[in-house]
Image: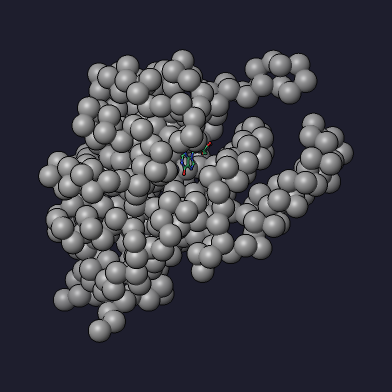
Amino acid sequence: MSKVASLEQLKTLPKIELHAHLSGSVRYSTILRLLNEELASDYHETSDEKLKSEIQLMEELKSKPTTNCTSHRSLTECFQIFTILHRLLSNLNILEQVTNEILHDFQSDNCVYLELRTTPRNIFDSKTGELKVSKEQYLKTVVNVIESFEKENLMKVRLILSVDRAKGLQDGLENVELAKKFKSKHVIGIDFSGNPHVDSFQNYESLFQLCDSYELKTTVHIAEIWEDKDVDFILKKIRPDRIGHSVCLTKEQIDYLIRNPIPIEICPTSNLVTKCVDVIENHPFYEFYTKKDTYPLVICTDDFGIFDTSLSREYSLISTAFNLSFKEMFDLSRRSIKCIFDQSNELVSFLEMVFNEFEKKNFE
Ligand code: IMP
Ligand code: ZN
C-alpha cells in the first residue's frame, strides 16, 4: 500500500541541510539575470561573444528540467557552469546578493539549520593580474551575510570551507588555516571536494591531520564515480566526520560502513543527473536505511541551483522511491541533528525543540 508523503507535506517538514555548495545553489534565473546585466552594462571585461554563448548554454540547461530525471548534466557540464559562476561571484556585491538569496531560499523551504560550504578564492584582475579580492575578503563577505541573516531570521547557519582537489595542497592548506582563524565566526569544518576525475585525496593526508589538530570537523566527497580510488583510504584510514555521495560503493564497502558507520550526506537528484545511479530505486540509501535502522543518513541538495531542485523535492524523491511515509520522513529529518558539525548545547536544544513541537502538532 502506498504511504508516500506529498511534496506539499514535505515542504512543511522542518529540515536540516548539510551538503550545499554556495556557487551550485545559485538559481538559473539569477545566473541568467546576472549574465544579461553584464552584457547590457557599458563596460564588461568578458567579450560579448563569450557572454552570449554562456547565456545560450544556461538557457539550454534551464530548458532541460531535472524534475523527471530524464535529463542529465554530466559532471563536466556542471564544472562548466561553475566556471561561469566563479566569474560572476568575483564581484563581492554579487556574492553578497546571491548568498543572501540562497539563505532565504533554504529558509522558505523550512530548512531550520544549514551548513553551507564554499571554496574561498583569491580573485585576480584579468588584465593586470593584480590581486583584487583575497580569500579572506571573500570569506568575510559570506560571513557578514550570514551574521546579518541570523539577526532577523530563525534558520541557523554555519559555514564549511571547501578544499578543491584540483587546486593542490598549498591552496587547501590556506583554506584550512583560514577555517581555523574564522572558527568563532560561523566556520565549523572542512569539505574535501572538486572534480573527482582530478588528483587523489591520498595526496591530502597531511591536511586531514591538520584539521584534526585544529579540531575542525571534516566531510569528504567519495564514490560519486565508479573510478574513485580513494574510497578505502577515506573509509578506513581517514575516518572523516561525514561523507558525501557514497553511491558507487562495492558490497564489501557497504558492509564495512554498516559495521563502522560514518554519517552519509545523500544527494538524490545530483546522483541521478550526473548518472551516478540510473534510477533512484537503485540508490544505496535504502540498503543503509533497511540494514541498520540507526544508520546516520542526511538528505541534502548538493547544488540545488545547478540541479534545479529543493530540499523538499529531495525528500519527496526518497519518500516516493522507497514508499516512506510522512512520519518516517520526519524521523529521518530529526535524525540529522546527530550529524551536524556544531553540537553545542544551545543549538542542539533549539533543533530538538523545533522537531518536538512539530511532532506534537502533527503526529500526537
Ligand atoms: P563553491 O565552493 O561555492 O564555489 O561551489 C562550487 C564548487 O563546489 C565547485 O567548484 C566544486 O569544487 C565543488 N562541487 C560542487 N558540486 C560538486 C560535486 O558534485 N562533486 C564535487 N565537487 C563539487
Ligand atoms: Zn557536493
Q: Is residue 350 left or right of residue 12?
A: left
Where is residue 263 shown, x and y percent of the image? 24, 45
Location of residue 252 (image quadrant): top left
Where is residue 51 shown, x and y percent of the image? 78, 43
The residue positioned 25% from the left and 23% from the top of the image is: 212
Query: Considering depth in this image, is 281 or 84 the residue closer to the camera?
Result: 281
Location of residue 46 (image quadrant): top right
Query: Considering depth in this image, is 322 or 345 the residue closer to the camera?
Result: 322
Q: Is residue 135 left or right of residue 321?
A: right
Q: Residue furthest right?
A: 42
Where is residue 49 shown, x and y percent of the image? 84, 41
Residue 81 seen in the current view: yes
When the figure is inspected, residue 331 is found, relative to residue 86, above or below; the finding is below
Q: In the rendered view of the protein, which quadrant contains the N terminus? A: bottom left
When the figure is inspected, residue 266 is found, relative to residue 321, above or below; the finding is above
Q: How is the image coloured?
A: one colour
Query: Considering depth in this image, is 141 or 125 the residue closer to the camera?
Result: 125
Where is residue 281 shown, x and y percent of the image? 34, 65
Q: Residue furthest bottom?
A: 1
- Quadrant location of ligand 2? top left
Q: In the rendered view of the protein, which quadrant contains the C terminus? A: bottom left
When the figure is inspected, residue 257 is found, relative to residue 162, above or below; the finding is below
Residue 178 seen in the current view: no
Marks counted in the figure total: 0
The residue positioned 22% from the left and 27% from the top of the image is: 237
Q: Is residue 270 left or right of residue 46?
A: left
Query: Considering depth in this image, is 152 or 330 the residue closer to the camera?
Result: 330
The residue positioned 37% from the left and 27% from the top of the image is: 201
The residue positioned 41% from the left and 27% from the top of the image is: 200
